[in-house]
Image: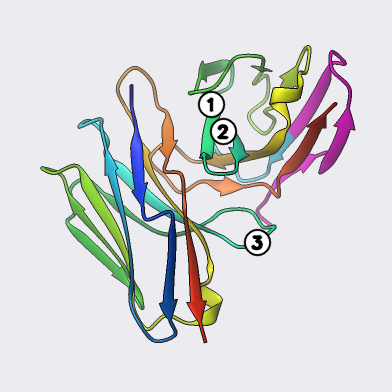
Amino acid sequence: GENVEQHPSTLSVQEGDSAVIKCTYSDSASNYFPWYKQELGKRPQLIIDIRSNVGEKKDQRIAVTLNKTAKHFSLHITETQPEDSAVYFCAASINTGGFKTIFGAGTRLFVKA
Amino acid sequence: EAQVTQNPRYLITVTGKKLTVTCSQNMNHEYMSWYRQDPGLGLRQIYYSMNVEVTDKGDVPEGYKVSRKEKRNFPLILESPSPNQTSLYFCASSFSSNQPQHFGDGTRLSIL
């Protein structure tokens, strides 16, 4: 069935360093790839998204890249700050046999001051 | 204020006692979903709805029911709850399946 794999499950970086989280998806018909940030005890909130007709998108310190051939997309956070510490989820919108949204298992990011 | 509202926020109940978690959105969104969040498993979609009277199964629909009689409301029904349905539940809505989803604050269910 459809699947989204996310790595790593935990990531620890020093403040100011970059962080990269990677996801792969199984359904080649997927066409929308959002990233959500969930702080402790809070709801997930969208931080950036990308569609299948775009290879890269950037918003200040956050960027997402998409490789449709490899069915792979990544989140890049530069100049990390302690407030970036949270759980990050990637997701893929599946449009075959329905309109499901499949999430990765999440990456817990720790930014050490 | 644009929001997704879930109730209750917390519930402790016993096996077999029917319960309903309500979800309401005020953004005129067509797409609504229910997810459960369990440690190490991320968010798993239970059911989703493309519009009024249109619902479909997500990845983990067993033991759950939903209905979409009005555009703004999407209740989650557990007819006979069991302990393996103890989890954190999120309702979400968006204009379509290919648009950012807005999440509610979550409902923590404990089934004893």
Q: CA distance from mark 3 to mark 2?
A: 24 Å
What's the residue type where badge 3 is placed? Leu
Residue at position x 33%, y 47% in the image: A33
What's the residue type where badge 2 is placed? Met
Q: Is residue B38 above or below residue A42?
A: above
Q: Taking A56 as reference, is B96 left or right?
A: right
Question: Nearer the N terminus, badge 2 or badge 1?
Answer: 2
Q: Secondary structure at mark 1?
A: strand
Q: Is residue A30 visible?
A: yes
Q: Is residue B93 above or below residue A47?
A: above
Residue at position x 34%, y 32% in the image: A3
Residue at position x 30%, y 22% in the image: A96
Query: Which residue corresponds to mark 2?
Result: B32
Q: Residues within 10 Å of mark 1 (few under 14, many from 20)?
A: many
**Mark 3 or 2, which is nearer the eye?**
3
Q: Taking B49 as reference, is B75 left or right?
A: right
Query: Which residue corresponds to mark 1?
Result: B48
What's the residue type where badge 1 is placed? Tyr
Locate the N terminus of chain A and report the quarter of the image it occupies: top left
Asked whether A46 or A39 is in front, the reply is: A39
